[in-house]
Image (cartoon, rainbow, N blue to C red):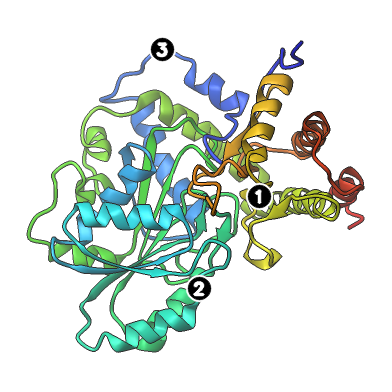
Amino acid sequence: MSLAQGRSYLAIPGPSVVPDAVLRAMHRASPNIYEGELVEMTAGIIPDLRAVARTQHHVAIYMGNGHAAWEAALSNVISAGDHVLVPSTGRFCVGWGEMATGLGAEVELMEFGTKTPMDADAIETRLRADKEHRIKAVLAVHVDTSTSIKNNIAEVRAALDGAGHPALLMVDCIASLGCDRFEMDAWGVDIMVTASQKGLMVTPGLGFVFFNDRADAVRAKMTRVSRYWNWTPRANPEKLFEYFGGTAPTHMLYGLRAALDMIHAEGLEAVWARHETLARAYWAACEAWGQGGPLTLNVADRAHRSHAVTALRLGAPHGTGLRRWTEHQAGMTLGIGLGMSEEGDPNGDGFFRIGHMGHVNAHMVLGTIATMQAGFDALGLPYGAGALDAATKVISGKA
């Protein structure tokens, strides 16, 4: 017998749960793409996107996922043969570097492991050693979705400034935007990339590249940029189709409009505070379970944990076993242990992740925790007591 009938819950770190209001906004007939309400709505979306990114600068919208946004950003400022520095704290840091390699860049990976954040002092030391300023950009990931490590982007900016290095600071906020605090302008970020399917609460399919005037000046000196990836007409359109390099992603724009309305109605500071509280509830439960069993959080220091995703180790094969039990017996899907492995567990069956980003609230979190504990019991896994009590104290404001 399965107890999974009824509405399922996707507790993976993206795609996140799409709000009913967003789905309703998308459920409509196709609009005129040349004039009328779609044109006016799109123009209004741009300043609201800037507000979420905390920037006064430019934004280009692409029909594509986060990987497309990676390539779009790189294509506008990096030429074949350029040197880029990639501080790595997980699979997605490596992936962005691989995208740069595919475009002909010379990629230097600075490996910081999968349990601790980037070391800004080490980055500054490397930049100081680059006397000829061969490094054209530093590709930093704010939150690596595979490890749940949150990196201090302001410290990376300080490393660049401390070294007196002119490299662009490019930041991946695909997992973090709208979940963890991010301040593009205040932190001195030149280029930021994100996508629609996580904190922005829309279905997958839109990528965004935010860039400042300094980055745009580098773009102006490029000898060749792909016509499709070129951010100049997208950020300065004369007609609607120039926003998108062709036909507009009409229904996703209606969904994005609804999602931005929800974010701004709640208030971005409140959105960040909600994500922090819900993340702490998960941490409290997981730390309690770990007192009497094999469960461990990937990131030991709370200050370095993301508020959008939590990566965990349960030991092979139990990570996969728990995921399969919660999905097939309880209707709740946990995230795979992407990019995580260890000796004796090459496929990462001992790891899993919880996504708590975007359209998520207290009862979703408490339901997830209770379902996971039922899974531990069903699989005969030991765990410490008091997880639900610890989580409810966080939710109630008593811890």
Dot in front, 3 or 2:
2
Q: How far apart are the two marked residues, 1 and 3, measured between alpha carbons?
A: 46 Å
Number of numbered callouts drawn: 3
Where's residue 382, x and y in %?
A: 83, 43
Judging by the rendered image, the residue that carries numbered circle 2 is: 154
Does dot 3 land on a helix, a strand or a loop?
A: loop
Q: Residue at x 62, y 52 (%)?
A: 268
Judging by the rendered image, the residue that carries numbered circle 1 is: 313
Instruction: Look at the numbered discs 3 and 2 and tell me whether their residues touch, using CB distance below 8 Å.
Output: no
Q: How far apart are the two marked residues, 3 and 2, measured between alpha carbons?
A: 44 Å
Quarter-of-image position of residue 161: bottom left
Label 1 crowd bin: few (<14), some (14–19), many (20+), radius 10 Å: many
Q: Name the amino acid type tagged 3.
A: Ala
Q: Residue at x 49, y 16 (%)?
A: 27
Label 3 crowd bin: few (<14), some (14–19), many (20+), radius 10 Å: few
Comes first in the chain, label 2 or label 1: 2
Quarter-of-image position of residue 366: top right
Of residues 264 and 104, which is closer to you in this image?
A: 104
Asked if residue 209 shows in the view, the reply is: yes
Where's residue 6, x and y in %?
A: 72, 14
Dot in front, 1 or 3:
1
Judging by the rendered image, the residue that carries numbered circle 3 is: 29
Q: Name the amino acid type tagged 2.
A: Ala
Quarter placement of the N terminus: top right
Where's residue 350, x and y in %?
A: 62, 44
Asked if residue 12 shows in the view, the reply is: no
Label 2 crowd bin: few (<14), some (14–19), many (20+), radius 10 Å: some
Of residues 66 and 178, which is closer to you in this image?
A: 66
Q: Residue at x 63, y 43 (%)?
A: 316
> Eyeballing the image, is 343 above or below 251?
below
